[in-house]
Amino acid sequence: MPARRTPVELCRGELRVSGSALHLDARRRVECAFVSHAHGDHIGRHDRTIATEPTLALMRHRLGEPKRRKTETLPASFRAPFGLGELTLELFAAGHVLGSAQIRVTGRSGVALGYTGDLCTEPTHAAERAEVMACDVLVLESTFGLPRYVFPPKDEVLAAVRRFVDDALSDGYTPVLLGYAVGKAQEILKYLSGAGYRCAAHPVVHAVDRVYEAHGVALPNVRALPPEGPAAGEVVVAPPHLARSPAMRGVRRRRTAVLTGWAIDGARFFRGADAAFPLSDHADFPSLLAYAKATGASRVLTVHGHADGLAAALRKEGLRAEPLREQAQLELL
Ligand SMILES: [Zn+2]
């Protein structure tokens, strides 16, 4: 017996708006996809790609120019509704990395489906501030969806990073800060360079910096890390997996800190580092709960990460919530 239409489906690991060709952050090549942001686990080459201009620019940087003639990009702006077949789409800032967007999809039934992508509700230094997306059914990311993930206020975390940098410099070390090349690195560079620190970015980070700068995020006092290493007094920023890469050979007397929300989990994330700070570009657990309520959604479907735990917590708060399962048979409202 055919099941009733669901607002969104998870098929072979890919999210798709039911009854349409519109996928959400598909990894495999699909006919039409909304790409929420340019992190590697959310992008792919599609026949038609809907994303913000900064996300499209970051995707071109990461994937290169599309070779297939059939490939089409549909740049979209925040809060500017547009039609796609029978659907009305509207993007809202997600506050995660530059250009990151949530999407609200309204079909003929009038039910508004909201998909957050990766979300950070706390203001960031190098991304658009997240907006609340009112919707009926919310598909909510769950990366830090367990009660133990409570981050200190960002100002406190950044102040602690700054103390780490100051201590390293005054002890004669080069401070090395490790964060993802897209987003985290630019946030710390923006914060430190704005405070007058001179920074040297790993070439992989610096290439992304240029895309940020082209979209209005000025990064003064930042240069590419030269092969001979940083000058005295410079702060080095690099991606965690490239901390020991050839480009870092010139960074000799170093003191290293990892910047990640997973620092909450403790020492195992210090591997080879001297410190870890919970600087996150995702919402923490209380923020996810608060966000779900703020959207006014009468139903929440959790995806990515701790989907079961977050759904259980949302139910405790009185919301109708469940993790989105593969080929879930859910009814429309
Ligand atoms: Zn992401």
Image: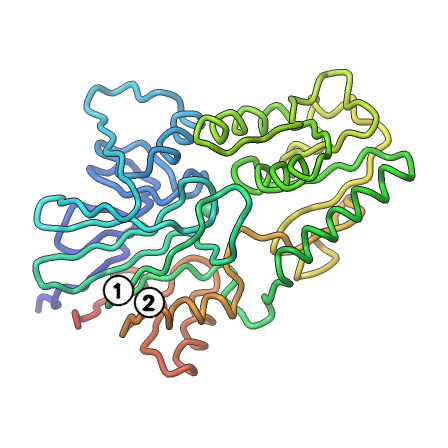
| Residue tagged 2 | 295
Q: Which part of the image, by quadrant, shows the N terminus?
A: bottom left
- Residue at point 56%, 35% (across, down): 181
- Residue at point 33%, 67% (across, down): 295
Q: Is residue 121 shown left or right of residue 233? A: left
Q: Residues within 10 Å of mark 2 (few under 14, many from 20)?
A: some
- Residue 179 location (% of width, % of height): 62, 41
Residue 231 is tagged as none
Question: Number of callouts in the render?
Answer: 2
| Residue tagged 1 | 135
Q: How is the image coloured?
A: rainbow
**Three-letter code, disc 2:** Thr
Q: Is residue 207 shown left or right of residue 36? A: right
Q: Is residue 233 above or below residue 263?
A: above
CA gap, disc 1 to disc 2? Answer: 6 Å
- Residue at point 62%, 50% (across, down): 260
- Residue 224 location (% of width, % of height): 65, 22
The residue at label 2 has a CB less than 8 Å from ligand 1: no
Disc on the earlier residue, 1 or 2: 1
**Three-letter code, disc 1:** Cys
- Residue 303 location (% of width, % of height): 38, 60
Q: Are circles 1 and 2 on residues that touch, CB within 8 Å?
A: yes
Q: Is residue 254 shown left or right of residue 32? A: right
